[in-house]
Image (cartoon, rainbow, N blue to C red):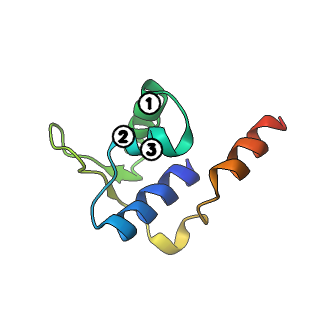
């Protein structure tokens, strides 16, 4: 969850807008349903807010300084593969 939140914040900082779910799918190399489930999980946990029917409407509800540092995707994948 932390890496998704870090990606959302970093993407917004770099691009001046929220990422689409497709952007997260490309970055993390996961399926569209996986990203969608994570977005729903983050929303239910009160970590993000999304406006239904509005593209690129993800808004972080946590302070950026509480987020982990965004790891390069190779680091994330190798950490997961170890388990």
The residue lying at 46 percent from left, 38 percent from top is 25
The residue lying at 64 percent from left, 56 percent from top is 72
Disc nearest the viewer among 2 and 1: 2
Crowding at dot 2, Cα within 10 Å, few <14 / some 14-19 / many 20+, comes out as many
Viewer-proximal residue among 3 and 75 = 75
The residue lying at 45 percent from left, 37 percent from top is 41
The numbered mark, 3 or 1, whose residue comes first in the sequence reads 3
Disc nearest the viewer among 3 and 1: 3
Q: CA distance from mark 2 to mark 3?
A: 5 Å
Element marked by disc 1: helix
Element marked by disc 3: helix
The residue furthest bottom is 65
Element marked by disc 2: helix
Q: Please, is residue 63 above or below residue 4 in the view?
A: below
Q: CA distance from mark 3 to mark 1?
A: 12 Å
Q: Is residue 65 left or right of residue 47?
A: right
Q: Determine whether label 3 and label 1 are within 8 Å by CB.
A: no
Query: Label 2 belongs to which residue?
Result: 21
Query: Label 1 belongs to which residue?
Result: 37
Percent position (x, y) of residue 45?
44, 45
Percent position (x, y) of residue 27?
51, 46
Number of numbered discs:
3
Q: Determine whether label 2 and label 3 are within 8 Å by CB.
A: yes
Q: Is residue 38 left or right of residue 50?
A: right
Q: Please, is residue 32 above or below residue 8 in the view?
A: above
Percent position (x, y) of residue 13?
38, 70
Q: Please, is residue 76 above or below residue 9 in the view?
A: above
The residue lying at 54 percent from left, 69 percent from top is 66
The residue furthest left is 53
Query: Label 3 belongs to which residue?
Result: 24
Of the 4 image quadrants, the one containing the C terminus is top right
């Amino acid at each position: 969850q932390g890496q998704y939140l870090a990606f959302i914040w970093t993407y917004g900082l770099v691009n001046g807008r929220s990422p689409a779910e497709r952007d997260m799918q490309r970055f993390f190399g996961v399926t569209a349903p996986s990203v969608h489930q994570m977005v729903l999980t983050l929303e239910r946990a009160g970590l993000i807010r999304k406006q239904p029917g509005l593209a690129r409407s993800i808004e972080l509800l946590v302070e950026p300084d509480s987020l982990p540092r965004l790891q390069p995707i190779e680091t994330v994948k190798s950490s997961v593969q170890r388990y």
